[in-house]
Amino acid sequence: MRTAIYPGSFDPLTNGHLDVIQRATKLFDRVIVAVAKNESKHPLFTIEERLEIVREGVRHLPAVEADSFDGLLVEYAERMAAQAVVRGLRAVSDFEFEFQLALMNRKLNERVETIFMMPKDTYTFLSSRIVKEIARFGGDVSSFVPAHVQIALKFKLASHPA
């Protein structure tokens, strides 16, 4: 079974993330969306909330599961018997950082390959940070995130105003 890990903060899950996940299911038998417990990024949603948001977003995809991890990605990939890590590239600006991560991961574990995937061009501008910013100012994010994420954002921002 070919397994890939799609890691990220997913704070929150966007339509761009879902596009990459769906594309990955065409290449792999199993895709694990791995929500990183990176508190240094000061996420809006807790790890439990982000995991639930991802689970809801991928439940219609039978080859996809959601999990969380802490620590080195390559160690997590090894534990999950994954052959690859999937990373989304939106623009050239993402490439340098992602390339460095891929090379470092290869140094740490050469058995885990990194696959770069581009989302549809309609999502190349999209990021969780931008979605949160638009939502904070009351903007319409319905074309950027699934409906359940839009509801979660409204609820979270109402209880934690900027």
Image (tube, rainbow, N blue to C red):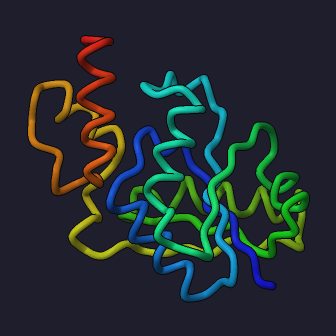
Tell me what residue is drawn at x 30 percent, y 12 percent.
159
**Residue 64 at x, y = what percent?**
60, 69
Residue 49 left/right relative to 105: left
Say which quadrant the N terminus sits in: bottom right
**Residue 79 at x, y = what percent?**
90, 58
**Residue 75 at x, y = what percent?**
88, 52
**Residue 16 at x, y = what percent?**
35, 62
Q: Which residue lies furthest to the left in this view?
A: 139
Looking at the picture, tell me which residue is in the foreground, 53 or 122.
53
Tell me what residue is drawn at x 69 percent, y 62 percent.
102
Say which quadrant the C terminus sits in: top left
| On screen, residue 20 above or below 134 | below
| On screen, residue 18 above or below 41 | below
Residue 56 left/right relative to 30: left
Tell me what residue is drawn at x 16 percent, y 57 percent.
143
Residue 48 figure quarter: top right
Tell me what residue is drawn at x 78 percent, y 58 percent.
105
Residue 125 figure quarter: bottom left
- The image shows a total of numbered marks equal to 0
| On screen, residue 98 above or below 111 | above
